[in-house]
Image: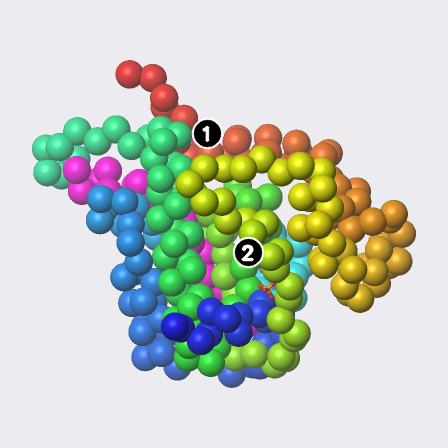
Amino acid sequence: MNKSIFSHRSIRNFKQDAIPENLMKKILEAAIRASNTGNMQAYSIVVSTEKAIKEKLLPLHFNQKMVVEAPAVITFCADLNRFEKWCKLRNAEPQYDNFLWLYTASIDAVIAAQNLCIAAEDEGLGICYLGTTNYTAKQIIDVLNLPKLVIPVTTVVLGYPNENPELTERLPLEAVVHFQKYSEYSDNDINSLYAEKESLELSRKLIVENETENLAQIFTQKRYTGKNNIHFSKELLKAIEEQGFMNNDN
Ligand SMILES: Cc1cc2nc3c(=O)[nH]c(=O)nc-3n(C[C@H](O)[C@H](O)[C@H](O)COP(=O)(O)O)c2cc1C
């Protein structure tokens, strides 16, 4: 079993050291070995190592300092642009400018991203995903010059760790795994499945810091609020439309 999977922790403090070119190439090769729909590889990977570009990306990732401190910021994009171009050059009529293929290509992009992360951690590097990609996709499109039918799906910062944080907890296996069919959760199930997480020292500390009644309210009232969720949904839908992915008619 791959050991780095079980020792994974997100890294948010990086050393300045650059990633050697041959190592970066190996990690990228690992990313593109991932399973992907129809072997079409409907994604692109944008590796940003230049200071000037990382500085432009910084505010788009809500000033998370890893964006400038990590030697590489890697944006994984759903990409039907390249595949459509190939089809058109070969007298094949593509119709991948729709929601199904945005969804499909996004899955491929994320699987490639996770392959990259596992390979990187195997080599002693650290990673952190940046969900902010989905909040500011439109602006990231501009900074990275993404053409129509290309949209950023997720970002990974990559570099040598300058910290060794504690492993974070996970819900017990029975909370997330269903055998044969989905078994709906009773209130009692929820109470017992979340009990351990809620009783952690860290959870109690966060509740005090956030001045909420409980852990769940930190998510709903502070981290991922309804107002922001709707705002960023609308922004993302606009970006998806502008990138040409909503041609769902014949
Ligand atoms: C899609 C995705 C987006 C994430 N976005 C952020 C982010 O913007 N900033 C951050 O510090 N961590 C981010 N993370 C890291 C998670 O917070 C982290 O994976 C989670 O808390 C579990 O901790 P661990 O990765 O150390 O096990 C993201 C993770 C994923 C998978």
Instruction: Indicate the amino acid at tag 1.
Output: Glu
- Asked if 187 appears above or below 71 in the picture, the reply is above
Instruction: Indicate the amino acid at tag 2.
Output: Leu
Residue 18 - label: none
User: Pointer 2: what residue?
Assistant: 173
Q: Which image quarter: residue 94?
A: top left
Residue 8 in the figure: left or right of residue 89: right
Asked if the stretch drawn in magenta spans residue 83, the answer is yes
Q: Position of residue 71 (x, y in %)?
A: 51, 73
The magenta segment: 70-87
Q: Position of residue 89 (x, y in %)?
A: 13, 39
Q: Position of residue 63 (x, y in %)?
A: 67, 59
- Asked if 75 appears above or below 121 in the picture, the reply is above
The N terminus appears in which quarter of the rendering?
bottom left
User: Pointer 1: what residue?
Assistant: 241
Q: Is residue 18 visible?
A: no
Residue 5 in the figure: left or right of residue 230: left
Q: Are marks 2 and 1 in contact (CB under 8 Å)?
A: no
Q: Is residue 27 visible?
A: yes
Q: Position of residue 17 (x, y in %)?
A: 51, 83
Looking at this view, is 215 or 162 the one in front?
215
- Label 2 or label 1, whichever comes before in sequence order: 2
Residue 16 in the figure: left or right of residue 123: right
Q: Residue at x 49, y 52 (%)?
A: 154
**Residues packed near mark 1 inside 10 Å, few (<14), some (14 to 19) or many (20 plus):** some
Q: Residue at x 27, y 61 (%)?
A: 33
Q: Residue at x 32, y 72 (%)?
A: 25
Looking at this view, is 109 or 208 the one in front?
208
Q: Which image quarter: residue 55?
A: bottom right
Asked if the stretch drawn in magenta spans residue 242, the answer is no
- Asked if 170 appears above or below 50 in the picture, the reply is above
Q: Residue at x 17, y 37 (%)?
A: 87
